[in-house]
Image: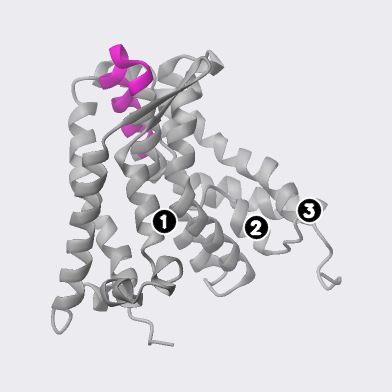
Amino acid sequence: MPEQKTEAELIKFEGRIPIFVRLLLTVLVIVIITELIGTKTINVGIANIVLLPMLYAVVIGVLITPDVLGKSITALQNIINSEEIALAGPLVTLALLPLGVKYGLLVGPAIGKVVQAGPAFILQEFGNLGTILIGLPVALMLGLRREAIGATVSICREPTLGIIAERYGINSPEGTGVLATYLVGTVLGTIFYALLGSIATLTKLHPYALAMACGMGSASMMTASAGALAATVPEMADTILAYAATSNMLTGIDGVYAEVFLALPFVNWLYKKIGPKEGGKK
């Protein structure tokens, strides 16, 4: 097994230029393919499911990995292997910076409406507890033990990884749980939230409330869900994106405190109440 590198070591150019070139060219090809496919709308009854290029990119990215098509196609192994996959993680943060600037510019013109909805942005952080109330019992029924704590404390994006890793260690059962949810969310989250965003208006909730719900602390998931929601209500598109971006930004700030002081104590308390006794057989 190759030696694990730190993030600082992964993004160094020295001696690693071919890895950067292979990864960036692969990304460029995927972007070209997905943009050529374009946005597709599928009518399902009274709902419209909007398929964005980002969804195709996720699917293609999964397929070309060594664990999928790379097993049988040697050429793919020469292009994308463990080194390129390890480098992709740190580069995601850099790639999302222009996206953050774009959404920051959208917030500006709509700042008046955003201020009016201010308290709602803070109160929605109690939604973090929903993943625990729904997810923890299901995880326990599936046979998880302490892994269920990390897996259900939130939707498990980067801030949650840091919190659990600092509190329990990434190699702990809780660390295994948070990492599993993070990986599943990375692969399926964008697709799930794009589909959810496209049919969210069927709930009859106000589009602005749905837009705030799109900001769950993940830039890619927020983009997918808010983009799909905006496509279903085009006359409110700019405000929807502004609300979603603001909600996502605030979730990245106060969401951390909500997880540390609310979600984590609550999930541990609930686990003690309904989970298996420590020392019992699995």
Using the image, determine if residue 3 lies above or below residue 141: below
Using the image, determine if residue 111 lies above or below residue 262: above
**Nearer mark to the viewer, of 3 and 1:** 3
The region drawn magenta spans 231-248
**Is residue 233 on the magenta stretch?**
yes
Q: Residues within 10 Å of mark 1 (few under 14, many from 20)?
A: some
**Nearer mark to the viewer, of 2 and 3:** 3
User: Quick one: quadrant of the C terminus?
Assistant: bottom right
Q: Quadrant of residue 250?
A: top left
Apparent side of residue 127 relative to residue 121 in the rendered image (left or right): right
Q: Residues within 10 Å of mark 3 (few under 14, many from 20)?
A: few
**What's under tag 2, amino acid-wise?**
Ile
Could you say which is closer to the camera, residue 262 or residue 73? Answer: 73
**Residue ID at (69%, 41%):** 133
**Residue ID at (65%, 57%):** 149
Residue 20 visible in the current orientation: yes
Give the residue number, with chain letter if any, for mark 1: 158
Give the residue number, with chain letter if any, for mark 3: 141
| Disc 3 to disc 1: CB gap under 8 Å | no
Residue 122 visible in the current orientation: no
Residue 149: image tag:
2
- What's the distance in space between the residues labelled 2 and 1, CA to CA? 16 Å
